């Protein structure tokens, strides 16, 4: 799908570091699952998925790891790490061609493995709680 995909170390130190995370969700609400992998968002072409997947590069070097509706606007947002920062990746348009970056409280480790999304509030419309090792991030939908 993407032979030109870079690694973390191509853009920031340490040079040996690679992207490890992968998330799927329908960012543009067309009924097909899109992909966030590392610093890239890939828009599913639909149909039999053999068409070109448009790649959008996030405006910072970040390892995108989750897709969830953080702010309750009905569109998936991304969560990623650019250690020590945990970043909120907010699409600025319906297709996901442009993204805004916000930060969440600092992380402490290069290892983004060991996270999940879970529904803690039964009446919540989205399973939008993100956990990571030694840290708890709560996004509460209204």
Image: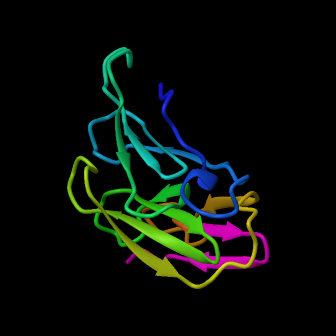
Outermost residue toward the left in this view = 93
- Image coordinates of residue 129 in percent, x first then y, are 57, 68
> Looking at the image, which is closer to me, 127 or 62?
62
Instruction: Give the magenta range.
Output: 130-142
Count of labels in the image: 0
Residue under the point 28% across and 66% down: 73
- Position of the C terminus, as image quadrant, is bottom left
Q: Indicate whether 122 appears above or below 5.
A: below
Nearest the viewer among 26 and 9 is 9
Q: What colouring method underlies this structural image?
A: rainbow
* Percent x, y of residue 47: 31, 18
- Residue 70, compared with residue 52, is above or below; it is below
Residue extending furthest toward the bottom: 105
Q: Quadrant of residue 80?
A: bottom right
Report whether 97 appears left or right of 5.
left
Q: Which one is nearer the viewer's eye here, 55 or 76?
A: 55
Looking at the picture, how far across and down is residue 128, in whole percent? 51, 65
Judged left or right of residue 19, residue 133 is right
Q: Is residue 75 magenta?
A: no
- Residue lying at 53% horizontally and 61% vertically, measured from the top left: 62
Q: Residue at x 73, y 79 (%)?
A: 108
Q: Is residue 119 left or right of residue 26?
A: right
Q: Residue furthest right?
A: 134
Q: Is residue 62 above or below residue 50?
A: below
In the rendered image, residue 86, in percent from the top left (x then y), is placed at 57, 74
């Amino acid at each position: 799908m993407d032979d030109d995909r870079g690694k973390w170390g191509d853009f920031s130190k340490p040079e040996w570091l690679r992207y490890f995370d992968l998330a799927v969700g329908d960012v543009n609400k067309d009924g097909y699952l899109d992909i966030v992998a590392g610093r890239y968002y890939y828009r599913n072409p639909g149909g039999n998925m053999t068409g070109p997947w448009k790649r959008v590069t996030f405006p910072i070097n970040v390892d995108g790891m989750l897709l969830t509706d953080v702010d309750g606007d009905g569109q998936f947002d991304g969560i990623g790490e650019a250690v020590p920062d945990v970043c909120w990746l907010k699409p600025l348009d319906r297709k996901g061609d442009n993204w805004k970056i916000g930060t969440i409280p600092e992380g402490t480790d290069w290892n983004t493995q060991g996270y999940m999304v879970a529904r803690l509030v039964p009446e919540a419309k989205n399973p939008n709680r993100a956990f990571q090792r030694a840290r708890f991030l709560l996004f509460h939908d209204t």
